[in-house]
Image (cartoon, rainbow, N blue to C red):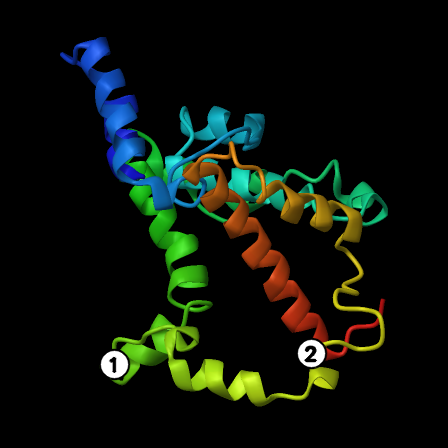
Amino acid sequence: HFRRDMLLHHTEGQDPAETERLLAKLVEDNQVSRGLLLPEGDSDTGAVCRTLLGFVPSWLEAMTGTGARMRALMRDDFLEPHRRTDVIATLLSSLDVRGRLEGRNAVHGALYLWAKTALPHYILSNLGDRMEMAHSVEGRVPFMDHNVAEYLHQVPVSMKIRGMTENDVPFLDQKKLVAALDGLRDPDADFGHQVITDQVLTLALSFVFMHEGLGISA
């Protein structure tokens, strides 16, 4: 995403046609990053972000796009109280944006915001790097381990499905989830679309696991 910021915001002396070619090649060569690290589709970072920064970092644009796709699977009654909340403005208000970013170029600004937000609070925490690196270990996702898959195969079905309900998370809309799953069967859907949909469904599945593990009631 920082390479994209370089192409978009450091245009002095660049041939516009060559810039467009490089942007297209960046997407073509990084299909698995579409929607995750590279923005895809509609996103809304809010007016405050562009006003304060003068640009929108590509990683932030990608994350807000993922958020928009995730909201498309949620129940309307859950979303309604939060529709007027400017999440990005709240995030930026926690940082000294003017003091730290004024006069910096776009790439350095994007790097600073990444280092202060997504890196410590997501990459190093949620993904487990902090615990692993503290012990000089480079971790690997356990679901790639055949032993885990074999163990789960032995888990009783009663622990996987309760009654007639497989997904009873209070803020997810079952009909929207089913529609998203049906969309994966579209023979005309390109690989990029499947990657983007997979990201959102992975988040939804994570919510289901949290719901089951924490015993949240609907």
| Camera-side residue of 99 and 150 | 150
Q: Which residue is mark 2?
A: 160
Which residue is most to the left? 13
Left or right: 198 as drawn, with respect to 124: right
Dot 1 falls on a residue whose secondary structure is loop
- Estimate the x, y position of residue 58 in percent, counting from the top left: 38, 35
Dividing the picture into quarters, in which one does residue 146 lie?
bottom left
Check the picture and name the quadrant holding the C terminus: bottom right
Q: Earlier in the sequence, mark 1 or mark 2?
A: 1
Name the residue located 80 percent from the left edge and 61 percent from the top edge. 170
Name the residue located 32 percent from the left edge and 39 percent from the top edge. 1
* Disc 1 residue type (three-letter): Val
Badge number at residue 137:
1
Placement of 131 over or under 87, stated as above or below: below
Which residue is most to the front? 187
Left or right: 144 as drawn, with respect to 20: right
Badge number at residue 194:
none
Residue 144: tell me if it is visible.
yes
Placement of 118 over or under 176, stated as above or below: below
- Estimate the x, y position of residue 111 in percent, counting from the top left: 30, 44
Dot 2 falls on a residue whose secondary structure is loop
| Camera-side residue of 123 and 20 | 20
Residue 104: tell me if it is visible.
no
Nearest to the eye among marks 1 and 2: give it: 2
* Disc 2 residue type (three-letter): Lys
Q: Residues within 10 Å of mark 2 (few under 14, many from 20)?
A: few
Dividing the picture into quarters, in which one does residue 14 lie?
top left
- Estimate the x, y position of residue 172 in percent, counting from the top left: 75, 54
- Estimate the x, y position of residue 95 in percent, counting from the top left: 46, 47
In 3D space, how far apart are the residues under numbered discs 1 and 2 (Cα atoms)?
Answer: 32 Å
Name the residue located 51 percent from the left edge and 29 percent from the top edge. 41
